[in-house]
Amino acid sequence: MKLLRASDHKRMPWKNGGGETVEIAVSPDGAGLADFDWRVSMATVATDGPFSVFAGIDRTLSILDGEGMTLFIEGRAPERLTQASEPLPFAADAPTSATLINGTIIDLNVMTRRGRLTHSVRRISVDGPGDADFGAGTTLVLCHRGNAEIDDLALDTGDCLLVSNANAARCSISGKAQLFQITIAAI
């Protein structure tokens, strides 16, 4: 298990230059926007506009803060995405644009290379002690709000726990927090 502190996340411009993203984790380590296998980041979206296109990539978006946005993904009906919405998966190479509902938002963006990897994203509420099963593959647990402790590792808001294949197991979890569990698996 590796703890990724919020203060260590990497800030960088969007691929299309339209804003800034905070990269939480990428694989392989040090990979750029053209050669990652998987990537987890947060972006501040302050204006309506197009999304960056990533050929051969699948992505899932979740709203972390703000009122939300309406996504216009080519070939699909418009999708209204808010903090209450389930994470929304779609192809990152489908032309996509967004209209903000009411001001700036922050989103969670998970991307994996199609044909090599798959991913899933789910929201977890923690209120007291319990167990978490991370199963096989790579799991990232982002502490969105509050504080949590996973196997004696303390996560504050913005921190992320990276659980590699070798450490996949059932873990103890406690605290009062809203978390996002991201599971990445090889095909």
Image (tube, helix red, strand yellow):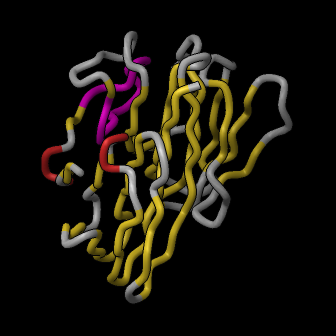
**Nearer the observer, 106 or 5:** 5
**Nearer the observer, 93 or 151:** 151
Instruction: From this view, report whether residue 28 is shown above or below residue 142.
Output: above
Name the residue at 28% across, 66% down: 157
In the rendering, at what x and y percent does residue 3 appear?
Answer: 19, 53
Say if the magenta span includes residue 16. Answer: yes
In the rendering, at what x and y percent does residue 160 appear?
Answer: 29, 54
Name the residue at 38% across, 44% down: 42
Instruction: From this view, report whether residue 157 is shown above or below residue 106.
Output: below
Left or right of 83? Residue 74 is right
Name the residue at 76% across, 45% down: 79
Residue 104 seen? no
Q: Quadrant of residue 10?
A: top left
In the rendering, at what x and y percent does residue 172 appear?
Answer: 34, 74
Instruction: From this view, report whether residue 130 is shown above or below residue 27.
Output: below
**Region in magenta:** 12-26
Say if the magenta span includes residue 165. Answer: no
Name the residue at 51% across, 69% down: 124
Q: Quadrant of residue 127?
A: bottom left
Q: Quadrant of the C terminus?
A: top right
